[in-house]
Image (tube, rainbow, N blue to C red):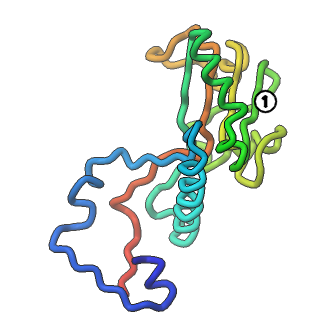
């Protein structure tokens, strides 16, 4: 409805319930474009994230969109092997690829308060991804993980040796989505 109205169409939505009063009000309001093994879903979500980011720019990010990423952390060799499979996923290659860091010299550091996309932009500068940075970042080895994460919180495995970060992922506050009043 938003894009129809922007194109000049007359749109009227009628719903007796308040916005987000059904299933959306119970969601985590998270998003991602990271779906290894599914090229169509990755492409679909890539476009959806483009639209979310454009809307955030139009309204001075009134709905708190962030791009802190999704973390997939492993302390097992099996988990690390699954993370490594992402390096060749065609869906991820189509939207920025995967940056791989295998030691502590990458110079990247996770900051929960960093601006949207800051880690991905830094990874792009360090040699990966397109304008949005890489679709994912893989940190292989305990030293590479520690250098990015810093000290691990107690609820994470201290011996984590592989961290796969879906870079173009995060959350928003849907209740604060601006509504056009046309």
Residue 93, by quadrant, is: top right
Quick one: 90 or 13, which is closer to the camera? 90
Q: Where is residue 27 in the image (x, y as percent from the top left)?
A: 32, 47
- Where is residue 96 drawn, in percent x and y? 72, 47
Q: In the displayed structure, would residue 89 be above or below residue 46?
A: above
Q: In which quarter of the image is the C terminus?
A: bottom left
| Front residue of 57 and 138 | 138
Picture coordinates of residue 165, whole percent (x, y): 61, 33
Q: What element carries label 1?
A: loop
Does residue 46 lie above or below 37 as drawn?
A: below
140 is higher (above) or lower (below) than 131:
above
Q: Position of residue 46 (x, y in %)?
A: 59, 54
Q: Is residue 176 left or right of residue 21?
A: right
| Residue located 44% across and 53% down the image | 172
Q: Is residue 64 left or right of residue 37?
A: left
Tell whether 44 sits left or right of 137. left
Residue 47 lies in quadrant? bottom right
Residue behind mark 1: 107
Callout 1 crowding tier (Cα within 10 Å): few <14, some 14–19, many ≥20: few
Frontmost residue, 168 versus 36: 36
Residue at position x 65%, y 44% in the image:
91
The quarter of the picture where the N terminus appears is bottom left
Q: Which residue is drawn at 66% across and 31% down?
A: 86
Foreground of the two, 99 or 64:
99
Who's the residue at 58% across and 37% down the image?
Answer: 37
């Amino acid at each position: 409805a938003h894009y129809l109205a922007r194109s000049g169409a007359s749109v009227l939505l009628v719903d007796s319930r308040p916005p987000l009063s059904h299933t959306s009000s119970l969601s985590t309001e998270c998003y991602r474009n990271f779906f290894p093994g599914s090229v169509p879903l990755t492409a679909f979500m890539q476009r959806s994230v483009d639209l979310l980011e454009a809307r955030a720019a139009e309204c001075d990010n009134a709905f708190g969109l962030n791009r802190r990423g999704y973390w997939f952390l492993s302390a097992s060799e099996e988990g690390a092997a699954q993370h490594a499979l992402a390096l060749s996923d065609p869906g991820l290659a189509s939207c920025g690829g995967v940056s791989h860091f295998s030691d502590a010299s990458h110079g990247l550091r996770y900051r929960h308060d960093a601006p949207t996309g800051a880690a991905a932009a830094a990874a792009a500068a360090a040699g990966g991804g397109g304008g949005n940075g890489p679709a994912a970042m893989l940190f292989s080895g305990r030293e590479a993980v520690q250098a990015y994460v810093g000290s691990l919180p107690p609820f994470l495995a201290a011996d984590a040796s592989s961290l796969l970060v879906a870079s173009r992922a995060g959350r928003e506050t849907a209740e604060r989505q601006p509504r056009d009043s046309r």
